[in-house]
Amino acid sequence: MTEERSLIRTPYRRRALAVGILATLLLAACSNTPGAATPTPSGSIGASQSASAHDLSQIPPAPNFNGSIAGAGATFPNPIYQQWLVDYNRDNPNIKVSYDSIGSGGGVAQITANTVQFGASDAPMKPDERTKASTQNGSDVLHIPTVFGAVVPAYNLAGVSAKLQFTPDALGGIFAGKITKWNDQAIASANPGVTLPATDITVVHRSDGSGTTNVWTDYLTKVSQVWKATLGANSVGKEVAWPVGLGGKGNEGVTATITQTPGAIGYIELAYAIQNNVPYGKVQNKSGAFVDATLASVTAAANLATVPSDLTFSSTNTDAADGYPIANATWLLVYKDQDKVSDNQARSEALVHFLLWILDKGEGEAKTLNYAALPDNLLQAARQAVATIFWKGQPIVDSLYK
């Protein structure tokens, strides 16, 4: 077996998220043994499977496992994930869970390569990505939503103390490279009474495969004709061909570049803006209101009318009158048939225990770092999805709730 390392950090609620400290580490996981079977990749928890008979809202006793579980992926939820690791590892000292904040693209790549026990992404895996993962490993990948967060337009504009307001057209024009000055009428018209300088705008975007980029470009594609006309058919994704701007790796890198570049504007997850004191603006939503990214406005955007069977969706450009329009969920990626990807049943039981802990105690901690917990209907569906994780055809929850 290769060596596994636990990445446990000081709780984020007790200190600011320092830009640049979250260095990318290459995690090694114990070697796994994929099975030979190749299922049809559906990405769904399975309509024919009945709801678990167990009370999944009650965390079961921890399994008898003394070892490590490794995860990697999205930077968007990294502040809350690191807090969860501290608290979970404190409550369950024999189970060492680590998480490497490398971006959603890296999370998809590592779960596909079966080098981690769970991946993380702010963008659902594409059909071809799901097919590749299931073909290589003999099991479908489940998408387990964890929290909702906001992506905000953060900026560095000296001499402007007012919180700026951005219309969809302004944001689309800025990131398409069509609006190049801070005093452009498209920005000024939404900010009456604010004196904007004739400073050049420097766009900052992600340089790596990013679910945060997917959320941002999904929103721009829905609301901006200029953005769509400029980018064409490839206007949304974890990676796009940016017309202008500077790249930064991870939310950490984009945050650092914004703070170091006068006249910059970029997109980062709300927690990074708050904890690094980076100014960010309000965004006009579908109802015409300029909405600040807050726990209340993200929670409003998180209330889904229906829950898709595979638990994947987009909640950007919400219909909620008081909802923040650039908010979305983030997902953990886990193989459904654990015996196909692991030679250690106890580790898989510990993984399921960790997921159930997240969907109970973890949800209760979300608001401390400005993330919105899952609404009840999505939370129940997520728990039922966890109950469909198997070991040799038997639900792992059966061995936990003895």
Image (cartoon, rainbow, N blue to C red):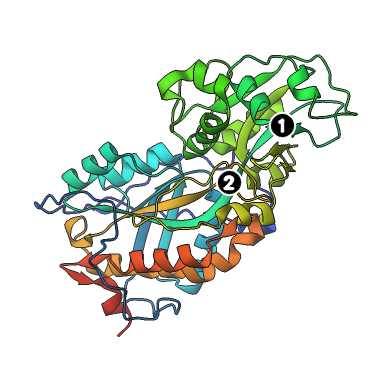
Left or right: residue 297 compared with residue 383: right
Left or right: residue 269 compared with residue 146: right
Residue 336 falls in image quadrant: bottom left
Residue 172 rendering spot, x and y as whole percentages = 61, 24
Contact (Cβ within 8 Å) of mark 2 with mark 1: no
Which amino acid type corresponds to the residue marked 2 in the rendered image? Thr
Query: Residue visible at 39% across and 79% down?
Result: 60
Q: Residue 166 carries which label?
A: 1
**Position above or below: 141 against 177:** below
Which amino acid type corresponds to the residue marked 1 in the rendered image? Phe
Q: Element type at marker 1?
A: strand
Q: Which mark is residue 318?
A: 2
Left or right: residue 218 compared with residue 324: left
Residue 396 rendering spot, x and y as whole percentages = 27, 72
Disc 1: CA contacts within 10 A as few (<14), some (14-19) or many (>=20)? many
**Which quadrant of the rendered structure holds the C terminus?**
bottom left
* Residue 108 in sight: yes
| Residue furthest to the bottom | 402
Query: Residue visible at 22% across and 64% down?
Result: 344
Q: Nearer the viewer, residue 232 or 53?
A: 232
**Position above or below: 315 against 94:** above
Residue 32 rendering spot, x and y as whole percentages = 21, 53
Q: Element type at marker 2?
A: loop
Residue 189 falls in image quadrant: top right
Disc 2: CA contacts within 10 A as few (<14), some (14-19) or many (>=20)? many
